[in-house]
Amino acid sequence: QKEVEQDPGPLSVPEGAIVSLNCTYSNSAFQYFMWYRQYSRKGPELLMYTYSSGNKEDGRFTAQVDKSSKYISLFIRDSQPSDSATYLCAMTSGGGADGLTFGKGTHLIIQP
Amino acid sequence: SQTIHQWPATLVQPVGSPLSLECTVEGTSNPNLYWYRQAAGRGLQLLFYSVGIGQISSEVPQNLSASRPQDRQFILSSKKLLLSDSGFYLCAWDGGADEKLFFGSGTQLSVL
């Protein structure tokens, strides 16, 4: 079983829709969770950072962590064509970023 | 604010040629520095990380090496490139205070 599982997509939705991106993981020690957005041929950009369980909201983005289910989600409201990108989840138990485990990313396409 | 510079953006090299990719960070001191490789369908692979000048940890045995001659400079090198070295190379840094990782813009390396 891989440590972090993420559906590669592509996920194609119409503009304005609510998007749900997800990752599952197996290591119960993970407690720091991140979402990165990566445009084609660019470096990943940190989008959301969450510690432990719960929700965090930033504008149109909401990150949700359910440690009991080992499941994290990123919701995008009122999706825009500019949200088209690959979204990577990342997580670690702590002790530094060298312990970060990344998902392989979900390719999201927002149709105008 | 902190910025990370990585160059070149694109590089085409023949098999057997040497490689030198450079990364510098501005606006912070004593950062932890990382080199990742991203191959299609394989996700992000941590190659090297460094917690200080001259201190390099290798995550994967390979044809590549890294050096940190200055506090905010990280160099990825190879004496003889292989076809399998092709990929998207990313430099990243963290401030050591948390697990947030910040990436450069990446170098697309094609070995032909």
Image (spheres, coloured by chain):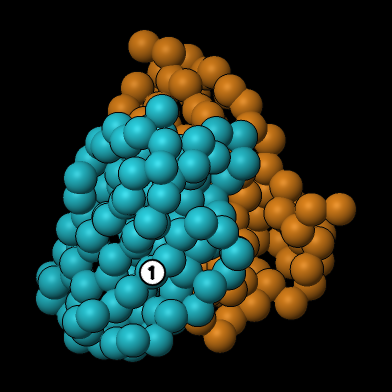
Chain colours: A orange, B cyan
* Dot 1: element: strand
- Quarter of the figure with the C terminus of chain B: top left
At 31% from the left and 51% from the top, the residue drawn is B19
- Residue farthest toward the top in the current orientation of the protein: A112
Drawn side of residue B40 relative to residue B86, left or right: right
At 42% from the left and 36% from the top, the residue drawn is B15
- The relative height of residue A51 versus residue A13 in the rendered view (above or below) is below
In terms of depth relative to the viewer, which is nearer, A107 or A58? A107
At 18% from the left and 58% from the top, the residue drawn is B5
Residue at the disc numbered 1: B66
- Quarter of the figure with the N terminus of chain B: bottom left
Where does the image place residue B97, in percent across and percent down from the top left? Answer: 39, 86
Where does the image place residue B103, in percent across and percent down from the top left? Answer: 33, 58
**Quarter occupied by residue A39:** top left
**Quarter occupied by residue B95:** bottom left
Where does the image place residue A63, in percent across and percent down from the top left? Answer: 53, 54
The kind of residue tagged 1 is Ala
Residue A8 seen from this side: yes
In terms of depth relative to the viewer, which is nearer, A10 or B37? B37
In terms of depth relative to the viewer, which is nearer, B95 or B43? B43
- Residue farthest toward the right in the current orientation of the protein: A1
- Quick one: label 1, few (<14), some, or many (20+) residues within 10 Å? many
- The relative height of residue A105 versus residue A1 in the rendered view (above or below) is above
Drawn side of residue A103 relative to residue A24, left or right: left
